[in-house]
Image (cartoon, helix red, strand yellow):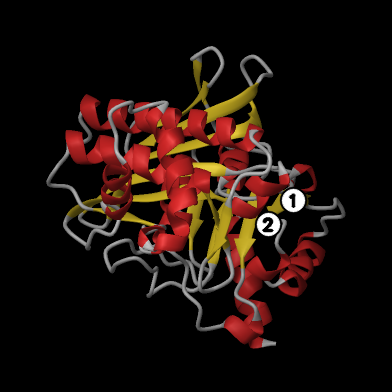
Amino acid sequence: MIKTQEKQVAIASVTAATQLCQRVRALKPSSTLHKADTSPVTVADFGSQAVICHALAEAFPHDPVIAEEDAFSLQKPESSIILAQITEQVQQILPQITPQDVIDSINWGNGKLAPRYWTLDPIDGTKGYIRGDQYAIALALVENGIIQLGVLACPALPSRSDGKQGVVFVGVRGHGSVEISLSTGKSQPIRVNAFNDTNQLRRIESVESAHSDRAVQNKIDEMLRWTQTPQQMDSQAKYGAVARGEADLYLRVPLPQFKAKKENIWDHAAGAIIVEEAGGKVTDLGGQPLNFSLGAKLSENNGILVSNGIIHQQVLDMIAQLDQS
């Protein structure tokens, strides 16, 4: 059972991190590092994680946080300039914080699996963030392997209530999903599409082609007789699009050369509960629920299928048929 405090702290910390990210985005250029896998990480990634982990550590000191970033690279002498930039941005929200506090807060996200834990992606879609496109800040609370709360901020996604840029999606287990305007704070319930005519439905996909096997996705489109060009969007904002009926199908099919690759929990947890509580469905490509009880990876799942629920089994059957061919 989610208490009011968990929801309030999650929304407040993610909203504060959103302000930091938007402020850093306006400062061009801002410093960027590259991780071992060559993916970029920015001042905003680190700052967002510091702000959210600081809030979680204060409110729920016994809850571990499993987050994407760590501060190892920031502790090297050659990173002193970027650490100073991160600290300066975090101090706009937490005035008394020191560089060491920033490092400690970021590393609070290096928690281990527990019966109750939070998982955080401080900026999901960093390449989209750098390009000036969509990105998301994704935070979820997991208890006994079940996602109980998801908060997903999409600062570049227009609000349906006022048309202004910036929304926060919130999903609470058993209580539905809502969209909150970042500009007005107005909240409204969201639901997936419930069309019976599949010709009215739409697919959404990642901008990055390496995220999914597009050959399989295109075959699914043909089998569904869909002719519309899929919308492309960075980050878990795609989950928000499905949850509020702007899209109806999102596939993440491992490329042949990456069949053994497993998804990170922070890339899907917040979005998954928001779609489910909006009436949709999220499984792997074999129809199995996503298992968040095993650590930082969805190690027992193969790929991701997100839908409005109505077409879910139909698409699963098509995937099975393609696997046999």
Rendered image quadrant of residue 221: bottom right
Helix, strand or loop for disc 1: strand
Q: Is residue 270 left or right of residue 224?
A: left
Helix, strand or loop for disc 2: loop
The residue that appears at 33% across and 50% down in the rendered structure is 106
* Frontmost residue, 319 versus 113: 113
Residue 206: mark: 2
Residue 204, x across and y down, in percent? 70, 51
Q: Earlier in the sequence, mark 2 or mark 1?
A: 2
Give the CA distance from mark 2 to mark 1: 5 Å
Rendered image quadrant of residue 226: bottom right
Q: Residues within 10 Å of mark 1 (few under 14, many from 20)?
A: few
The residue that appears at 23% across and 34% down in the rendered structure is 2
Q: Which residue is mark 1?
A: 232
Q: How many marks?
A: 2
Residue 139, x across and y down, in percent? 39, 43
Q: Is residue 199 left or right of residue 316?
A: right
* Frontmost residue, 21 versus 195: 21
